[in-house]
Image (cartoon, helix red, strand yellow):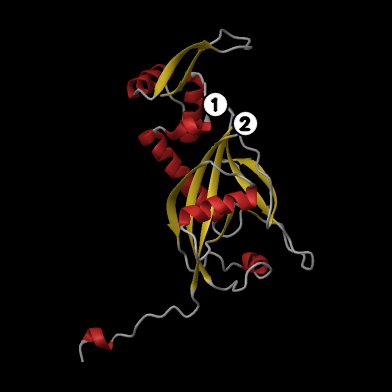
Amino acid sequence: MSKKNSEPTPKNTLGMDVSVDCVVFGFDNDTLKVLLIEQKQPDTVHLKTQNAVPGDLVLDNESLDEAAKRILQELTSLKGIYLKQFHAFGDPNRVRGLKDQQWLRTFRVNPERRVLTIGYYSLVKLSEFKPKAASFAGKTYWVDVYNIPSLAFDHNEIVHKALLMLRHELMADHIGFELLPEKFTLSQLQKLYEIILDKKLDKRNFRKNILRTETVTALEEKQQGVLHKPAQLFSKK
């Protein structure tokens, strides 16, 4: 008998679920923020309150993109926002911690099943979107990306990976405009880059490089209602 035929066939005895977790970034001109939900607690069981990024299982009849849109709308009421898949998280024990299992047993038919999750990140203009908690989200709130509390499951790792991807695509694809108002100054744009990249940038070089990319259009408008000299406004090209 050949070695190939003598090897046992791997089996998945517990089965596996697939979920989607969404890291939603927002910018308020001073800090880069992440949207968290507070997991709703069952009335009959007293559990320690946990926070998480919005996420849930994928339904049998939907694609991953459809699941991401549905989950965000169901848990936070957000819809019509920028969404992009960025990473898969498949640690066999990612949902099997004691604190997580206690919560899962109140909301899942098979809480012990392994869960593979697909991470999505979103970019929103804070002035245009007002999240509202629903389903098993007790409430929603924004937190500074550099001051995130301990989260449920492996969600701290998921946020960290999303931030690394945001940094990469900020430089490669200039996606930061999704976080800014329709009209902005180059100083606002530079501050956004500095906060996301977590480092200071030379003002002259930044402006030269941004204008060279031809991703912005200078408007015949200036800031209004500011105490300092009004700066020229730009928009995404």
Left or right: 211 with respect to 151? left
Label 2 neighbourhood size at 10 Å, few (<14), some (14-19), many (20+)?
few
Mark 1 secondary-structure assignment: loop
* Image-quadrant location for residue 78: top right
Quadrant the C terminus occupies: top left
- Of residue 162 and residue 77, the one placed in the foreground of this image is 77
In the displayed image of the protein, which residue is found farthest to the bottom?
1
| Quadrant where the image shows the N terminus | bottom left
Q: Which residue is mark 1?
A: 181
Residue 127, numbered circle: 2
Which percent across, then down, holds residue 50? 67, 56
The residues tagged by marks 2 and 1 sit, at their Cα atoms, a distance apart of: 8 Å
- Vertically, is 59 above or below 214? below
Residue at the image position 64 percent from the left and 12 percent from the top: 225
At 50% from the left edge and 54% from the top edge, which residue is drawn? Answer: 66
- The secondary structure type at the circle numbered 2 is loop
Q: Nearer the viewer, residue 145 or 185?
A: 185
Q: Between disc 2 and disc 1, whose residue precedes?
A: 2
**Residue 16, x across and y down, in percent:** 49, 71
Name which quarter of the figure residue 228 lies in: top right
In-front residue for pair 58/188: 58
Amino acid on which the number 1 mark rests in the picture: Pro
Residue furthest top as drawn: 229
User: Residue at position x 43%, y 53% from top?
Assistant: 87
* Badge 2 amino acid: Ser
x then y, percent, for residue 154: 54, 58
Residue appearing at x 38%, y 25% in the figure: 215
Question: Do the CB atoms of the residues marked 2 and 1 lie less than 8 Å apart?
Answer: yes
